[in-house]
Image: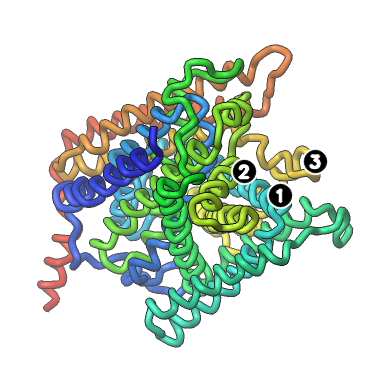
Amino acid sequence: MSPVLLMGIGLAILALGYLVYSKYLAKRVYRLNDEFRTPSHEFNDGVDHVPTNKFILWGHHFTSVAGAAPIVGPAVALIWGWVPAFLWVTLGTVFFAGMHDFGALWASVRNKGQSIGALSGRYIGKRGAGLFLVVIFILLLMVIAAFAVVITGLLISTPTAVIPTWGAIGVALLVGLAVYRLRMPLVAVTIVGVTALYGLIVLGNAVPVVLPETFLGMTPTVFWILTLFIYGAFASLLPVWVLLQPRDYINGVQLFIGLILLYGAVVIGMFVADGAHEIVTPAINMNVPEGTPSIVPLLFVTIACGAISGFHGMVSSGTSSKQLDKETDSRFVGYFGAVGEGLLALGTIIAISAGLRTVAEWEDLYSSFGQAGVDSFVQGGGMLLESGLGLPASLSATVLATMAVLFAATSLDTGFRLMRFVVQEMGERVNLRIGKYTATGVVVVLGMGLTFSQGLGGEGGLRIWPLFGTTNQLMASLTLMILAVMLIRKRRNPWPALIPLAIVFVMSFWAAIDQLFSFATPGSADWLLFAIDCVIIVSSVLVAVEGVRAIIRARRHPPESDDADEKLEAVREEV
């Protein structure tokens, strides 16, 4: 199979999804209205609620939801073959992720920028909302702890990525100043910012930063994890225009340039004698290594962010909805943000499948389940860039490693901000007002406590990661449940939400049950994961029951008038 053909088919499917299906959702299902007053204007405070250019907001949204997951998930899932991974990434992006991310953004905007957890109280019920927050809290704790460890590992294994990783913060601060204070043209600022970022990548490749075995009395692992937690705490407290938006925007542009280079290398490789590639990954692997779980349901939770992810709904309703300038921008920000994630997941499939030269290399990499990951993407993609574009191997690895680190970092500090919101929301439910500094302190303590719970090597950060996929997908199904209730109340077509809801919930719940038995295996039992999995399963079942009741009530409920029409009518009366 030619990687160029696979790439062409994948790009065509994703393009049709955005150009055709997202238009249908915008016009017929969500019925976007430019005159609707968004929360960014209604509650503009210059910190969390800030009307934002849709291209800048897309950068924030896309890079926040991306992280390392759309790389890790497809990389692991290739153990079952490239066909299942390819189909779930492309079709999942078009019909599942796009609808979910776009819908969560629309639902939050129509409800004063409330988070998906708060919306569950209105559309599912108070009992369901409390349990909903439990799932959200566990998921965000996983993201914060695990991504801190993943980034640390990349900074140590690829020291050439250290300078561009931290230098990107300085570039973002200058971009935010230029756009929001100096009012400079966005195009000019983008060109200068991206040029500076790639200049840092070249500098980092020439000057790798390797910490000594003991640095400031700490190992490199402890030092980087502490530094990342400090950074995440401060970044989550700054006004969004200072660092969050500009950094994510520049990272988003950088990713698209990286993908263009990667895809371009595949095409050029066709015309270079020693650069041509064929996919070495089997289409469907019938000889998976011993210990590999069944493709059904594990494929659907292993590839999470590359097809659909509950974390995306939290970003859509947690930060993006508070920055949306016009409601019609939500199609570009939400749906095209999901398409960007699909492009990254597709690029990962091609980089590993075509970047490895022989079947023997592939079999060595996939000798056990979970062995492949970000390093595999960097290795395979680096080979494609080297053979197709002639980039030096070290520079190719630096480009891809920096891309992975920067996306993981954006998800890290967005996770900090979202978890701070959740802590404050939990306080409100028990009539306790928690300030943002106190809430951030709680997030840092809990996150670091989990990360170092198994030792100073940060092993605790990945301790509960095996539950990420199932928790994430269960979260996505619960978000789709809220969308279904909203659409039924408004007497609009609910099937774009109901069909993905049924598939995602069944697969993720099935996976959670499978994992529960594996955590209790005699001789290798992990009772902490068993207990957490039980909490997640019970919470999900109870929320699902409440959700079904809410759907039945919604069908009997009088049609809910459109919020936009009500507000426009109120404005007309005032005039």
Give the mark nearer the N terminus: 3 vs 2. 2
Quarter of the figure with residue 505: top left
Please give the count of numbered marks on the rendered protein.
Answer: 3
Residue 239 on image: x %, y %: 51, 72
Give the mark nearer the N terminus: 1 vs 3. 1
The residue under label 3 is 455
Residue 546 sits above or below residue 24 on the image: above
Q: In the rendered structure, find residue 157 and report the number of the disc placed on it.
A: 1
Dot 1 and dot 3 residues touching (CB under 8 Å): no
Front residue of 425 and 461: 461
Q: Look at the numbered disc 2 and give the secondary structure of its residue.
A: helix
Give the mark nearer the N terminus: 1 vs 2. 1
Residue 179 on image: x %, y %: 43, 80
Residue type marked 1 = Ser
Residue 61 showing in the rendered view: yes
Gap between marks 1 and 3, in whole Å?
20 Å
Gap between marks 1 and 2, in whole Å?
9 Å
Q: Nearer the viewer, mark 1 or mark 3?
A: 1
Gap between marks 3 and 2, in whole Å?
24 Å
Residue 4 sits above or below residue 500 on the image: below
Residue 58 on image: x %, y %: 38, 61
**Residue at image coords 50%, 20%:** 513
Q: Residue furthest front?
A: 273
Residue type marked 2 = Asp
Q: Residue furthest top?
A: 522
Q: Nearer the viewer, mark 3 or mark 2?
A: 2
Front residue of 271 and 192: 271
The residue under label 2 is 375
Quarter of the figure with residue 371: top right
Location of the C terminus by quadrant is bottom left
